[in-house]
Amino acid sequence: MSIERLLKRVRSDKAEQAETGLERNKREQRIEQIRKQLADYIRVGTVYFKRIMRTDRFGLKYETLERWKIETLQEDFKQAIHELNVYLPRRQAKYSVSDFIEKYDAFCNVPDNTNYRRVIDNCYNLYSPIIHETATWHSPEDTKHIEQFLVHIFGEQIDVALDYLTILLLYPKQILPILCLVSQENNTGKTTFLNFMKAIFQNNAVVLNSDDFQDSFNSHYASKLLVMIDENFVEVEKRKEKERIKQLGTASKIMLHLKGADRKEIDYYGKLIMTSNYEENFIRIDAEDIRFWVIKVPAMQERDPDILAKMIAEIPAFLDFLRNKRAIKHPKTERHWFSNELLETQARKKVIENTKPMHEEVLDSFFQDYFDQTGLQETTMSVQDILNENQRYNHIKYLNHKNIKEYLRKNKYEYTGSVVRYSYTSIASGTQTIVSKSGRVYRIRKRDEQELCTKQDEQLPF
Protein backbone atom coordinates (compact mmCIF):
# COMPACT_ATOMS: atom_id res chain seq x y z
CA MET A 1 0.00 0.00 0.00
CA SER A 2 1.36 3.41 -0.95
CA ILE A 3 2.20 6.03 1.66
CA GLU A 4 -0.50 8.30 0.24
CA ARG A 5 -3.24 5.67 0.55
CA LEU A 6 -2.13 4.74 4.12
CA LEU A 7 -2.26 8.37 5.25
CA LYS A 8 -5.67 8.78 3.67
CA ARG A 9 -7.03 5.73 5.60
CA VAL A 10 -5.60 6.96 8.92
CA ARG A 11 -7.25 10.34 8.36
CA SER A 12 -10.58 8.55 7.63
CA ASP A 13 -10.38 6.40 10.81
CA LYS A 14 -9.74 9.52 12.93
CA ALA A 15 -12.72 11.30 11.37
CA GLU A 16 -14.93 8.26 12.04
CA GLN A 17 -13.76 8.12 15.69
CA ALA A 18 -14.51 11.81 16.16
CA GLU A 19 -17.95 11.38 14.61
CA THR A 20 -18.68 8.35 16.87
CA GLY A 21 -17.81 10.42 19.95
CA LEU A 22 -20.25 13.11 18.82
CA GLU A 23 -22.97 10.54 18.31
CA ARG A 24 -22.30 9.10 21.75
CA ASN A 25 -22.85 12.50 23.36
CA LYS A 26 -26.06 13.00 21.41
CA ARG A 27 -27.24 9.55 22.42
CA GLU A 28 -26.56 10.17 26.12
CA GLN A 29 -28.36 13.51 26.00
CA ARG A 30 -31.33 11.94 24.26
CA ILE A 31 -31.45 9.10 26.79
CA GLU A 32 -31.57 11.62 29.64
CA GLN A 33 -34.35 13.60 27.94
CA ILE A 34 -36.50 10.49 27.41
CA ARG A 35 -35.84 9.28 30.94
CA LYS A 36 -37.18 12.58 32.33
CA GLN A 37 -40.21 12.47 30.05
CA LEU A 38 -41.06 8.95 31.21
CA ALA A 39 -40.26 9.50 34.91
CA ASP A 40 -43.96 9.63 35.86
CA TYR A 41 -44.70 6.20 34.39
CA ILE A 42 -44.23 2.96 36.31
CA ARG A 43 -44.97 -0.71 35.81
CA VAL A 44 -46.30 -2.72 38.73
CA GLY A 45 -46.36 -6.43 37.96
CA THR A 46 -47.46 -6.43 34.33
CA VAL A 47 -49.63 -3.28 34.40
CA TYR A 48 -48.48 0.24 33.50
CA PHE A 49 -49.51 3.36 35.43
CA LYS A 50 -48.92 7.10 35.27
CA ARG A 51 -48.38 9.17 38.40
CA ILE A 52 -50.49 12.31 38.10
CA MET A 53 -50.32 15.29 40.44
CA ARG A 54 -53.63 16.96 41.21
CA THR A 55 -54.45 20.09 43.17
CA ASP A 56 -57.55 20.12 45.37
CA ARG A 57 -59.78 23.08 46.13
CA PHE A 58 -57.62 23.98 49.13
CA GLY A 59 -54.52 24.32 46.93
CA LEU A 60 -53.02 21.09 48.31
CA LYS A 61 -51.28 18.74 45.87
CA TYR A 62 -51.69 14.99 45.90
CA GLU A 63 -50.65 12.11 43.67
CA THR A 64 -52.93 9.61 41.95
CA LEU A 65 -52.16 6.52 39.87
CA GLU A 66 -53.96 6.12 36.55
CA ARG A 67 -53.70 2.93 34.51
CA TRP A 68 -51.90 3.55 31.18
CA LYS A 69 -51.85 1.30 28.15
CA ILE A 70 -48.41 0.31 26.83
CA GLU A 71 -49.74 0.83 23.28
CA THR A 72 -50.45 4.48 24.15
CA LEU A 73 -46.94 4.92 25.55
CA GLN A 74 -45.37 3.40 22.47
CA GLU A 75 -47.39 5.67 20.22
CA ASP A 76 -46.64 8.82 22.25
CA PHE A 77 -42.86 8.18 22.36
CA LYS A 78 -42.42 6.47 19.00
CA GLN A 79 -40.58 9.39 17.41
CA ALA A 80 -38.33 10.03 20.44
CA ILE A 81 -37.25 6.37 20.61
CA HIS A 82 -36.62 6.32 16.85
CA GLU A 83 -34.39 9.40 17.07
CA LEU A 84 -32.46 7.78 19.91
CA ASN A 85 -31.88 4.56 18.02
CA VAL A 86 -30.44 6.51 15.06
CA TYR A 87 -27.38 7.30 17.18
CA LEU A 88 -26.78 3.71 18.24
CA PRO A 89 -23.80 1.72 16.87
CA ARG A 90 -24.87 -0.72 14.21
CA ARG A 91 -24.56 -3.86 16.36
CA GLN A 92 -26.10 -2.51 19.62
CA ALA A 93 -29.63 -3.65 20.61
CA LYS A 94 -32.36 -1.09 20.03
CA TYR A 95 -34.10 0.78 22.85
CA SER A 96 -37.87 0.54 23.60
CA VAL A 97 -40.19 2.60 25.80
CA SER A 98 -40.17 -0.11 28.48
CA ASP A 99 -36.42 0.34 29.00
CA PHE A 100 -37.02 3.77 30.56
CA ILE A 101 -39.83 2.86 32.97
CA GLU A 102 -39.29 1.88 36.62
CA LYS A 103 -40.58 -1.62 37.33
CA TYR A 104 -41.89 -3.00 40.63
CA ASP A 105 -43.02 -6.48 41.59
CA ALA A 106 -46.24 -5.50 43.35
CA PHE A 107 -48.03 -2.84 45.38
CA CYS A 108 -47.64 -2.56 49.13
CA ASN A 109 -49.25 -0.31 51.73
CA VAL A 110 -46.92 0.76 54.55
CA PRO A 111 -48.04 3.93 56.35
CA ASP A 112 -45.21 5.86 57.97
CA ASN A 113 -45.29 9.57 58.75
CA THR A 114 -41.81 9.63 60.27
CA ASN A 115 -39.44 7.58 58.06
CA TYR A 116 -41.31 7.32 54.79
CA ARG A 117 -40.15 4.99 51.97
CA ARG A 118 -41.68 4.88 48.50
CA VAL A 119 -40.15 1.51 47.55
CA ILE A 120 -40.03 -1.43 49.98
CA ASP A 121 -38.59 -4.78 48.82
CA ASN A 122 -39.16 -3.66 45.22
CA CYS A 123 -42.85 -3.07 45.96
CA TYR A 124 -44.42 0.30 45.19
CA ASN A 125 -45.81 1.89 48.37
CA LEU A 126 -49.32 3.23 47.82
CA TYR A 127 -49.11 5.28 51.01
CA SER A 128 -47.96 8.84 50.33
CA PRO A 129 -45.72 11.12 52.38
CA ILE A 130 -47.50 13.99 54.09
CA ILE A 131 -45.72 17.18 53.10
CA HIS A 132 -46.16 20.40 55.08
CA GLU A 133 -43.94 23.36 55.76
CA THR A 134 -41.79 23.06 58.87
CA ALA A 135 -42.91 25.16 61.84
CA THR A 136 -42.37 25.19 65.60
CA TRP A 137 -45.21 25.34 68.10
CA HIS A 138 -44.44 27.91 70.81
CA SER A 139 -47.78 28.56 72.53
CA PRO A 140 -51.53 27.86 72.18
CA GLU A 141 -51.76 31.08 70.19
CA ASP A 142 -50.02 29.32 67.28
CA THR A 143 -52.95 26.89 66.90
CA LYS A 144 -55.82 28.79 68.51
CA HIS A 145 -58.29 28.23 65.67
CA ILE A 146 -57.63 24.48 65.60
CA GLU A 147 -57.95 24.26 69.36
CA GLN A 148 -61.25 26.17 69.41
CA PHE A 149 -62.66 24.04 66.62
CA LEU A 150 -61.66 20.71 68.17
CA VAL A 151 -63.10 21.76 71.55
CA HIS A 152 -66.34 22.59 69.76
CA ILE A 153 -66.45 19.15 68.09
CA PHE A 154 -65.34 16.96 71.00
CA GLY A 155 -66.22 18.99 74.10
CA GLU A 156 -65.12 17.27 77.30
CA GLN A 157 -63.43 14.51 75.29
CA ILE A 158 -60.87 16.88 73.75
CA ASP A 159 -57.96 14.97 75.35
CA VAL A 160 -59.20 11.72 73.81
CA ALA A 161 -59.47 13.51 70.45
CA LEU A 162 -55.91 14.86 70.69
CA ASP A 163 -54.66 11.38 71.57
CA TYR A 164 -56.57 10.02 68.56
CA LEU A 165 -54.85 12.54 66.26
CA THR A 166 -51.43 11.93 67.83
CA ILE A 167 -51.75 8.17 67.33
CA LEU A 168 -52.83 8.71 63.71
CA LEU A 169 -49.70 10.75 63.11
CA LEU A 170 -47.10 8.76 65.08
CA TYR A 171 -48.53 5.23 64.97
CA PRO A 172 -50.56 5.04 61.74
CA LYS A 173 -50.66 1.23 61.84
CA GLN A 174 -52.55 1.21 65.15
CA ILE A 175 -56.25 0.21 65.04
CA LEU A 176 -58.52 3.01 66.27
CA PRO A 177 -62.25 3.19 66.98
CA ILE A 178 -64.78 4.17 64.31
CA LEU A 179 -65.38 7.86 64.92
CA CYS A 180 -68.97 8.97 64.26
CA LEU A 181 -69.93 12.66 64.31
CA VAL A 182 -73.69 13.06 64.38
CA SER A 183 -76.17 15.90 64.64
CA GLN A 184 -79.53 16.72 63.07
CA GLU A 185 -78.73 20.41 63.32
CA ASN A 186 -77.09 22.44 60.55
CA ASN A 187 -73.88 24.45 60.80
CA THR A 188 -72.15 22.08 63.22
CA GLY A 189 -68.76 21.72 61.52
CA LYS A 190 -68.93 17.96 60.83
CA THR A 191 -67.96 18.31 57.16
CA THR A 192 -65.37 20.95 58.04
CA PHE A 193 -63.73 18.41 60.35
CA LEU A 194 -63.47 15.91 57.49
CA ASN A 195 -61.91 18.55 55.23
CA PHE A 196 -59.49 19.48 58.01
CA MET A 197 -58.38 15.85 58.35
CA LYS A 198 -57.99 15.66 54.57
CA ALA A 199 -55.79 18.77 54.68
CA ILE A 200 -53.53 17.20 57.34
CA PHE A 201 -53.13 13.74 55.83
CA GLN A 202 -53.45 14.83 52.19
CA ASN A 203 -53.41 11.93 49.74
CA ASN A 204 -53.75 9.43 52.60
CA ALA A 205 -57.29 10.58 53.38
CA VAL A 206 -60.42 10.42 51.25
CA VAL A 207 -63.94 11.78 51.72
CA LEU A 208 -66.65 9.56 50.22
CA ASN A 209 -70.39 9.60 49.98
CA SER A 210 -72.39 6.40 50.46
CA ASP A 211 -72.39 5.61 46.71
CA ASP A 212 -68.58 5.95 46.48
CA PHE A 213 -68.22 3.63 49.44
CA GLN A 214 -70.41 0.95 47.86
CA ASP A 215 -68.55 0.96 44.50
CA SER A 216 -67.08 -2.44 43.63
CA PHE A 217 -63.73 -0.79 42.72
CA ASN A 218 -61.94 0.29 45.89
CA SER A 219 -58.61 1.75 44.75
CA HIS A 220 -59.87 5.19 45.82
CA TYR A 221 -59.83 4.16 49.49
CA ALA A 222 -58.12 0.75 49.93
CA SER A 223 -54.70 2.25 50.72
CA LYS A 224 -55.91 5.31 52.65
CA LEU A 225 -55.19 5.96 56.30
CA LEU A 226 -58.52 7.78 56.71
CA VAL A 227 -61.70 6.63 54.98
CA MET A 228 -64.29 9.30 55.73
CA ILE A 229 -67.96 8.85 54.80
CA ASP A 230 -69.94 12.09 54.78
CA GLU A 231 -73.68 12.16 55.58
CA ASN A 232 -73.91 8.42 55.99
CA PHE A 233 -77.05 6.45 56.73
CA VAL A 234 -77.28 2.66 56.77
CA GLU A 235 -80.80 1.29 56.90
CA VAL A 236 -81.28 -0.45 60.23
CA GLU A 237 -82.14 -3.83 58.70
CA LYS A 238 -79.29 -3.83 56.15
CA ARG A 239 -76.91 -6.07 58.05
CA LYS A 240 -74.58 -6.48 55.06
CA GLU A 241 -73.72 -2.77 54.88
CA LYS A 242 -73.23 -2.54 58.62
CA GLU A 243 -70.89 -5.53 58.64
CA ARG A 244 -68.89 -3.99 55.79
CA ILE A 245 -68.41 -0.79 57.79
CA LYS A 246 -67.45 -2.72 60.93
CA GLN A 247 -65.03 -4.88 58.94
CA LEU A 248 -63.31 -1.84 57.45
CA GLY A 249 -62.92 -0.43 60.93
CA THR A 250 -60.69 -3.32 62.04
CA ALA A 251 -59.57 -5.27 58.95
CA SER A 252 -55.87 -6.03 58.53
CA LYS A 253 -56.03 -7.04 54.84
CA ILE A 254 -58.06 -5.84 51.87
CA MET A 255 -58.37 -6.89 48.23
CA LEU A 256 -57.14 -3.97 46.10
CA HIS A 257 -59.45 -3.78 43.07
CA LEU A 258 -58.16 -1.48 40.32
CA LYS A 259 -59.96 -1.02 37.03
CA GLY A 260 -58.29 -3.13 34.37
CA ALA A 261 -56.09 -5.00 36.83
CA ASP A 262 -56.36 -8.22 38.81
CA ARG A 263 -57.37 -8.06 42.46
CA LYS A 264 -54.39 -8.12 44.81
CA GLU A 265 -54.31 -8.45 48.57
CA ILE A 266 -52.56 -5.64 50.43
CA ASP A 267 -52.21 -4.64 54.07
CA TYR A 268 -55.00 -2.33 55.21
CA TYR A 269 -54.70 0.35 57.89
CA GLY A 270 -57.76 2.49 57.22
CA LYS A 271 -59.47 4.34 60.07
CA LEU A 272 -63.16 5.02 59.52
CA ILE A 273 -64.80 8.38 60.24
CA MET A 274 -68.52 8.84 59.60
CA THR A 275 -70.82 11.85 59.78
CA SER A 276 -74.60 11.82 59.70
CA ASN A 277 -77.65 13.99 60.28
CA TYR A 278 -79.46 10.91 61.64
CA GLU A 279 -78.05 11.18 65.11
CA GLU A 280 -80.05 8.37 66.73
CA ASN A 281 -80.28 5.73 63.98
CA PHE A 282 -77.59 6.34 61.33
CA ILE A 283 -76.42 2.74 61.79
CA ARG A 284 -77.37 -0.15 64.03
CA ILE A 285 -75.03 -0.41 66.99
CA ASP A 286 -75.35 -3.30 69.43
CA ALA A 287 -74.20 -3.02 73.02
CA GLU A 288 -71.25 -5.30 72.23
CA ASP A 289 -70.09 -3.12 69.32
CA ILE A 290 -67.38 -1.46 71.35
CA ARG A 291 -65.52 -0.07 68.35
CA PHE A 292 -67.96 2.84 67.72
CA TRP A 293 -67.12 6.26 69.23
CA VAL A 294 -70.20 8.43 68.72
CA ILE A 295 -70.03 12.19 69.28
CA LYS A 296 -73.04 14.49 69.08
CA VAL A 297 -71.80 17.77 67.65
CA PRO A 298 -73.63 20.96 68.69
CA ALA A 299 -74.37 23.86 66.35
CA MET A 300 -71.71 26.53 66.21
CA GLN A 301 -72.51 29.63 68.23
CA GLU A 302 -70.52 31.89 65.92
CA ARG A 303 -70.05 31.11 62.25
CA ASP A 304 -66.66 31.84 60.67
CA PRO A 305 -66.71 31.19 56.89
CA ASP A 306 -62.89 31.23 56.84
CA ILE A 307 -62.33 28.81 59.73
CA LEU A 308 -61.00 26.00 57.50
CA ALA A 309 -58.47 28.27 55.78
CA LYS A 310 -57.29 29.55 59.18
CA MET A 311 -56.87 26.00 60.48
CA ILE A 312 -54.98 24.88 57.38
CA ALA A 313 -52.52 27.74 57.94
CA GLU A 314 -51.92 26.41 61.47
CA ILE A 315 -51.33 22.77 60.45
CA PRO A 316 -47.48 22.92 60.41
CA ALA A 317 -47.38 24.22 64.00
CA PHE A 318 -50.12 21.79 65.04
CA LEU A 319 -48.12 18.82 63.71
CA ASP A 320 -45.08 19.97 65.70
CA PHE A 321 -47.33 20.18 68.77
CA LEU A 322 -48.57 16.61 68.28
CA ARG A 323 -45.12 15.21 67.50
CA ASN A 324 -42.97 16.99 70.03
CA LYS A 325 -44.93 19.01 72.58
CA ARG A 326 -47.50 16.65 74.09
CA ALA A 327 -47.59 13.12 75.44
CA ILE A 328 -50.45 10.67 74.87
CA LYS A 329 -52.58 10.86 78.02
CA HIS A 330 -54.52 7.62 77.73
CA PRO A 331 -52.45 4.41 77.68
CA LYS A 332 -53.35 1.57 75.34
CA THR A 333 -55.81 -0.79 77.01
CA GLU A 334 -57.77 -2.31 74.11
CA ARG A 335 -57.16 -3.52 70.58
CA HIS A 336 -58.44 -0.15 69.38
CA TRP A 337 -56.24 1.59 72.01
CA PHE A 338 -58.86 3.40 74.11
CA SER A 339 -60.73 1.81 77.01
CA ASN A 340 -64.41 1.11 76.42
CA GLU A 341 -65.37 3.53 79.19
CA LEU A 342 -63.70 6.42 77.35
CA LEU A 343 -65.72 5.72 74.21
CA GLU A 344 -69.06 5.43 76.00
CA THR A 345 -71.17 8.53 75.30
CA GLN A 346 -74.82 9.48 75.65
CA ALA A 347 -74.99 9.75 71.85
CA ARG A 348 -73.86 6.14 71.52
CA LYS A 349 -76.42 4.94 74.08
CA LYS A 350 -79.20 6.61 72.11
CA VAL A 351 -78.13 4.89 68.90
CA ILE A 352 -78.04 1.50 70.65
CA GLU A 353 -81.52 2.04 72.10
CA ASN A 354 -83.04 3.30 68.84
CA THR A 355 -81.57 0.68 66.53
CA LYS A 356 -82.40 -2.53 68.38
CA PRO A 357 -83.39 -5.44 66.13
CA MET A 358 -87.18 -5.66 65.88
CA HIS A 359 -87.34 -8.98 67.72
CA GLU A 360 -85.52 -7.44 70.69
CA GLU A 361 -87.96 -4.50 70.71
CA VAL A 362 -90.88 -6.92 70.64
CA LEU A 363 -89.56 -9.17 73.41
CA ASP A 364 -88.51 -6.28 75.65
CA SER A 365 -92.02 -4.86 75.37
CA PHE A 366 -93.69 -8.24 75.85
CA PHE A 367 -91.82 -9.17 79.03
CA GLN A 368 -92.35 -5.73 80.50
CA ASP A 369 -96.12 -6.03 79.89
CA TYR A 370 -96.14 -9.65 81.08
CA PHE A 371 -94.59 -8.92 84.46
CA ASP A 372 -96.68 -5.75 84.91
CA GLN A 373 -99.91 -7.71 84.29
CA THR A 374 -99.09 -10.78 86.34
CA GLY A 375 -97.28 -9.01 89.16
CA LEU A 376 -94.66 -11.77 89.10
CA GLN A 377 -90.94 -11.28 89.54
CA GLU A 378 -89.94 -14.47 87.75
CA THR A 379 -91.36 -17.11 85.39
CA THR A 380 -90.31 -20.19 83.43
CA MET A 381 -91.15 -20.55 79.73
CA SER A 382 -90.04 -22.50 76.71
CA VAL A 383 -89.27 -20.85 73.38
CA GLN A 384 -92.58 -22.16 72.02
CA ASP A 385 -94.44 -20.70 75.03
CA ILE A 386 -93.00 -17.26 74.20
CA LEU A 387 -94.16 -17.61 70.60
CA ASN A 388 -97.64 -18.64 71.74
CA GLU A 389 -97.94 -15.77 74.19
CA ASN A 390 -97.04 -13.24 71.49
CA GLN A 391 -99.84 -14.37 69.19
CA ARG A 392 -102.12 -12.10 71.16
CA TYR A 393 -100.00 -9.10 70.12
CA ASN A 394 -99.65 -10.23 66.48
CA HIS A 395 -95.87 -10.23 66.86
CA ILE A 396 -95.26 -13.62 65.28
CA LYS A 397 -93.99 -12.05 62.04
CA TYR A 398 -91.02 -10.62 63.98
CA LEU A 399 -90.26 -13.74 66.03
CA ASN A 400 -88.93 -17.22 65.41
CA HIS A 401 -87.23 -19.88 67.48
CA LYS A 402 -83.76 -18.71 66.45
CA ASN A 403 -84.05 -15.04 67.39
CA ILE A 404 -85.93 -15.82 70.63
CA LYS A 405 -83.08 -18.12 71.70
CA GLU A 406 -80.58 -15.42 70.70
CA TYR A 407 -82.42 -12.88 72.86
CA LEU A 408 -82.65 -15.18 75.88
CA ARG A 409 -78.97 -16.10 75.72
CA LYS A 410 -77.91 -12.51 75.17
CA ASN A 411 -79.78 -11.54 78.34
CA LYS A 412 -78.15 -14.44 80.20
CA TYR A 413 -81.37 -16.13 81.29
CA GLU A 414 -80.83 -19.55 82.88
CA TYR A 415 -81.60 -22.56 80.66
CA THR A 416 -82.56 -25.91 82.20
CA GLY A 417 -81.12 -27.97 79.35
CA SER A 418 -83.14 -31.06 80.24
CA VAL A 419 -86.88 -31.72 80.20
CA VAL A 420 -88.60 -30.63 83.44
CA ARG A 421 -92.15 -30.22 84.75
CA TYR A 422 -93.07 -26.57 85.04
CA SER A 423 -95.99 -24.19 85.10
CA TYR A 424 -96.40 -20.55 84.12
CA THR A 425 -99.10 -17.89 84.04
CA SER A 426 -100.42 -17.37 80.51
CA ILE A 427 -101.93 -14.06 79.36
CA ALA A 428 -102.39 -15.10 75.70
CA SER A 429 -106.20 -15.24 75.96
CA GLY A 430 -106.50 -11.86 77.63
CA THR A 431 -107.04 -13.43 81.04
CA GLN A 432 -104.54 -15.06 83.35
CA THR A 433 -104.51 -18.84 83.38
CA ILE A 434 -102.07 -21.34 84.81
CA VAL A 435 -100.49 -23.69 82.26
CA SER A 436 -98.66 -26.85 83.41
CA LYS A 437 -96.53 -28.94 81.04
CA SER A 438 -93.12 -30.54 80.47
CA GLY A 439 -90.25 -29.18 78.40
CA ARG A 440 -86.92 -27.42 78.26
CA VAL A 441 -87.33 -23.94 79.67
CA TYR A 442 -85.61 -20.67 80.46
CA ARG A 443 -85.91 -19.01 83.86
CA ILE A 444 -86.84 -15.40 83.12
CA ARG A 445 -86.87 -12.72 85.79
CA LYS A 446 -88.20 -9.19 85.80
CA ARG A 447 -85.66 -6.45 85.30
CA ASP A 448 -86.04 -3.02 86.83
CA GLU A 449 -85.05 0.23 85.12
CA GLN A 450 -81.60 0.24 86.68
CA GLU A 451 -80.88 -3.25 85.34
CA LEU A 452 -82.05 -2.21 81.88
CA CYS A 453 -79.63 0.72 81.90
CA THR A 454 -76.83 -1.52 83.14
CA LYS A 455 -77.54 -3.96 80.32
CA GLN A 456 -77.18 -1.22 77.76
CA ASP A 457 -73.88 -0.14 79.28
CA GLU A 458 -72.35 -3.63 79.29
CA GLN A 459 -69.42 -4.22 76.97
CA LEU A 460 -68.46 -7.70 75.83
CA PRO A 461 -64.95 -8.64 74.67
CA PHE A 462 -64.24 -7.68 71.05
Image (cartoon, rainbow, N blue to C red):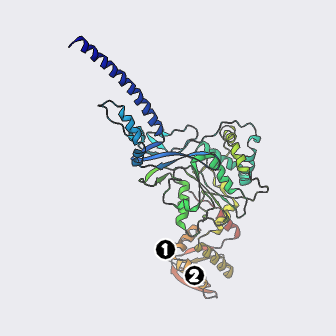
Residue furthest to the left in view is 1
- Name which residue type carries label 2: Ser
Q: Secondary structure at mark 1?
A: loop
- Checking the image for residue 149, the label placed there is none
Total labels drawn:
2
Which three-letter amino acid code belongs to the residue tagged 1? Ser
Q: Position of residue 250 (x, y in %)?
A: 54, 54
Q: Tell me which residue sits at (73%, 50%) in the image.
A: 307
Q: Which residue is mark 1?
A: 418
Give the residue furthest to the right. Answer: 302
Would residue 140 appear left or right of 377 to someone viewing this image?
A: right
Question: In the rendered view, does 428 fall on the left or right side of 219?
Answer: right
Q: Is residue 456 shown above or below 326? A: below
Residue 62 against residue 244 in the figure, above or below: above
Q: Position of residue 337 (x, y in %)?
A: 60, 49
Picture disc at residue 423: 2
Viewer-closest of 80 and 351: 80
**Which quarter of the image is occupied by the C terminus?**
bottom right
Work out whether residue 108 can be spotted: no
